[in-house]
Image (cartoon, rainbow, N blue to C red):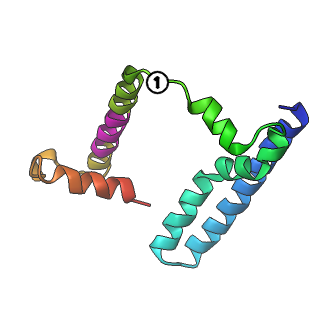
Amino acid sequence: MEQRNLTRYFIFTYLLFWLLLGVTGYLISVDVPELIQTIMKNVCAWTPTFVLLLMFRKLYPNISLRDYFKYNFSGKTKSRYFVVVLLLQSAIFVGAVLAYFALNEIRLKSISWPRGTIPVGLIVLWLP
């Protein structure tokens, strides 16, 4: 990958991110529906991926996107990596739920465990 193209990638990523973030902020300020706000927030989060796909030919001129994925994801991954990632994501999720409870002064005893855990967790994940 050429240094010049990598620099362009970073510049375009930041420019597009800030542009989309500005549009998202504007949409929030004019009270568009929450669904649109959430979609725009997710689009902002995926900006680096969008720029990579748009610039793929410049960044990797000698390989197709399909071949790139085959080459980078063809090896076998050890199952322990998946377990570690799953445990890490679970710990982050539990931490986020507990932080939500603490910030909103919700007592853990007021939630019926485990039946109430999943709905509360989903609400925490979907909060804007």
Rendered view: 106 above or below 80: below
Residue 40: x, y in percent? 57, 65
Residue shown at 16% from the left, 48% from the top: 107
Q: Quadrant of the C terminus?
A: bottom left
Give the answer, above or below, for where 64 lies relative to 127: above
The percent position of residue 122, horizontal first and vertical second, equals: 30, 55
Left or right: residue 36 compared with residue 118: right
Residue at 37% x, 23% y: name it. Answer: 79
- Which of the pair 106/52 is nearer the observer? 52
Of residues 69 and 124, the one nearer the viewer is 69
Q: Secondary structure at mark 1?
A: loop
Residue 105 in picture, x, y percent from top left? 24, 51
Circle 1 sits on which residue? Answer: 77
Q: What amino acid does circle 1 point to?
A: Thr
Q: Is residue 119 in view? A: yes
Q: Nearer the viewer, residue 39 or 52?
A: 52
Q: Which residue is painted at 60% across and 52% down in the image?
A: 46
The answer to which image quadrant residue 80 occupies is top left
Q: Main secondary structure of the magenta part?
A: helix
- Is 9 within the magenta? no
Above-or-below relation of 106 to 87? below
Judging depth in this view, the residue of 90 and 23 nearest the camera is 90
Which span of residues is magenta-colored? 89-98
Whole-percent x, y for residue 83 in the image: 34, 26
